[in-house]
Image (cartoon, rainbow, N blue to C red):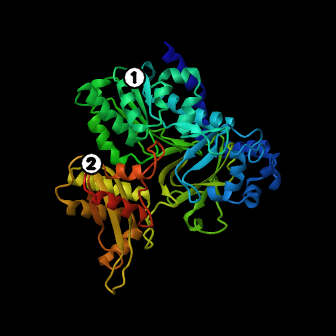
């Protein structure tokens, strides 16, 4: 009966809150901003910019610059090294969320305050739990275990604090009732060597009643395949017959969907997307039939949005929530109780609805193809890869793409070059794969289509089908494997692509 009590308790608080998010977005965001400014007015940052609880949003935006991680880093470093009352009131937090590299270091470190942990990450997690049990009561999801794969944490390079993947920090501090619901136990979940972690976790969960999966699709596939192998089963539904839900995030799910349907050929299986990062938990999928994500507006984060035309300006101007439009891509700008003030996350989103505010993730401000004015974002690339894979009967595990820049000759054209790794045999007709990829991009992106017109500016895409294991081998060369390490999908430089192709060209050992 404990599962029913937990489901009822979370639904009692979370479902009304999500209703307010849908119905009162502007009032909630105004209240969040008042709270943040009121709490931080006595900090060094707050005094510098004249914070006060009643400061109008327009004045806040006029006083405080939009900052990237690199621009905010001098103040962040003070916090990371233990200085109190810099960006958020009180002692420097003892947890630091570590994520993928930035231009001034291999990794970036985000202070994880108690308020950010409880008012954002945990609150959103409870909301997702309540929503899941509300949407699928027949699955009795909480009667079994939630299998969650996270990263690890260790000593911070800045001092006595602990630093690591935000997933590991969240699991380390879960309340007792939440820890009761999940598996594997912390000593296994927080192992820092991923090959050992996969093996030991697979053996531990093999005989458990797993009903929910939560994690990054890439690593979850590796784990599920190992579980199937250990069980001597054909698919995971034979191992966990009550499995009913996968809460996934971090990467677009489109290219992975067919892989999961093969691994879990169960009519009861459902998938919901979450949008969280080291900087915060931003959105969740509240309507199973649509891929749009409800922006969480009562979870300790104040949002602004940077239009694409402002991305490269030295003093970019963001717009508030009430000024966004359906269609264009915006870069996410956040102010949070972790002390991130008008912070440019680096993700781009597109609004699909304004009543309520729902978004789709379209890419990264730094990870998109725009060498020729084609403005191909991650959303376009994922859809094109999925279409090409479906048309040729293959499953794509990983890919990356970069420009082919114009050469010296008068007839030289630009183009895009792709490295694609399949899960299984490559397409029997590689030319067909490239053709569908190109055709889909032209359908989805008018700028790309214009550049491809009669091959005048851009030639057809050049696709390399690299051997299995290529991307994993490339990732290993970047440092220890972990939950936050991802393959850059799109880049306007050729560094990643050429490194991946160099790995692919080496003979198998």
- In this view, the residue in front, 165 or 62, is 165
Residue appearing at x 43%, y 65% in the figure:
369
Q: Position of residue 434 (x, y in %)?
A: 26, 63
Q: Secondary structure at mark 2?
A: loop
Q: Position of residue 50 (x, y in %)?
A: 82, 53
Toward the bottom, the furthest residue is 410
* Residue 223: image tag: none
Left or right: where 326 falls relative to 335: left
- How far from the left and from the top, in percent, is residue 252? 41, 48
Q: Position of residue 15 (x, y in %)?
A: 56, 30
Residue sitting at the far front: 509
| Mark earlier in primary sequence (1, 2) | 1
Q: Check the image and report above or below for 277 versus 2.
A: below
Task: Say if residue 68 shows up in the picture.
Answer: no
In the drawing, does residue 246 fall left or right of residue 160? left
Q: Which residue is mark 1?
A: 138
Q: Quick check: 33 left or right of 305?
A: right
Name the residue located 25 percent from the left edge and 64 percent from the top edge: 435
Which residue was labeled with disc 2?
Answer: 395
Q: Residue at x 25, y 52 (%)?
A: 508
Observer-nearest of 193 and 355: 193
Query: Residue at the location (36% across, 84% down)?
Result: 408
Q: Residues within 10 Å of mark 1 (few under 14, many from 20)?
A: few
Mark 1 → mark 2, Cα distance in angstroms = 32 Å
Q: Residues within 10 Å of mark 2 (few under 14, many from 20)?
A: many
Q: Classify mark 1: helix, strand or loop.
A: helix
């Amino acid at each position: 009966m404990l599962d029913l009590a937990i489901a009822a308790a979370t639904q009692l608080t979370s479902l009304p809150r999500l209703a307010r998010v849908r119905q009162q977005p502007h009032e909630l965001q105004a209240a969040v901003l008042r709270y943040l400014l009121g709490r931080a007015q006595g900090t060094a940052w707050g005094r510098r910019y004249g914070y006060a609880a009643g400061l109008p949003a327009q004045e806040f935006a006029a006083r405080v610059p939009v900052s990237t991680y690199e621009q905010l880093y001098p103040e962040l470093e003070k916090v990371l090294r233990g200085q109190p009352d810099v960006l958020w009131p009180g002692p420097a937090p003892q947890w630091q969320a570590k994520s993928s590299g930035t231009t001034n270091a291999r990794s970036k470190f985000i202070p994880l305050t108690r308020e950010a942990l409880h008012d954002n990450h945990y609150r959103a997690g409870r909301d997702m739990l309540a929503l899941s049990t509300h949407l699928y009561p027949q699955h009795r999801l909480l009667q079994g275990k939630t299998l969650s794969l996270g990263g690890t944490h260790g000593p911070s390079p800045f001092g006595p604090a602990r630093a690591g993947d935000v997933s590991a920090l969240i699991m380390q501090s879960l309340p007792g009732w939440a820890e009761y619901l999940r598996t594997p136990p912390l000593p296994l979940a927080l192992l820092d060597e991923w090959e050992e972690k996969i093996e030991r976790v697979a053996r531990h969960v093999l005989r458990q009643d797993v009903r929910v999966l939560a994690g990054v699709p890439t690593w979850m596939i590796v784990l599920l395949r190992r579980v199937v192998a250990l069980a001597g089963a054909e698919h995971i539904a034979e191992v966990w017959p009550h499995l009913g839900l996968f809460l996934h995030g971090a990467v677009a799910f489109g290219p992975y969907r067919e892989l999961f349907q093969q691994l879990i050929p169960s009519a009861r299986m459902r998938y919901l997307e979450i949008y969280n990062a080291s900087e915060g938990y931003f959105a969740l999928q509240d309507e199973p039939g649509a891929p749009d994500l409800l922006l969480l507006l009562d979870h300790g984060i104040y949002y602004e949005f940077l239009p694409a035309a402002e991305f490269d300006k030295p003093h970019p101007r963001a717009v508030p929530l009430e000024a966004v439009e359906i269609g264009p891509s915006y870069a996410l700008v956040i102010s949070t109780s972790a002390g991130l003030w008008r912070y440019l996350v680096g993700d781009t989103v597109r609004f699909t609805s304004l009543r309520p505010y729902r978004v789709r993730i379209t890419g990264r401000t730094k990870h998109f193809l725009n060498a020729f004015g084609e403005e191909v974002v991650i959303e376009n690339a994922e859809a094109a890869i999925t279409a090409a894979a479906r048309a040729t009967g293959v499953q794509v595990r990983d890919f990356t793409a970069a420009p082919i820049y114009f050469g010296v000759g008068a007839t030289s054209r630009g183009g895009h070059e792709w490295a694609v790794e399949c899960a299984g045999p490559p397409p029997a007709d590689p030319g067909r794969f490239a053709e569908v990829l190109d055709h889909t991009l032209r359908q989805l992106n008018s700028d790309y289509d214009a550049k491809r017109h009669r091959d005048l500016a851009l030639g057809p895409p050049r696709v390399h089908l690299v051997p299995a294991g290529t991307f994993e081998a490339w990732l290993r060369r970047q440092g220890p494997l972990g939950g936050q390490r991802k393959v850059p999908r799109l880049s306007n430089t050729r560094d990643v692509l050429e490194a991946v192709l160099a790995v692919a060209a080496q003979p198998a050992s």
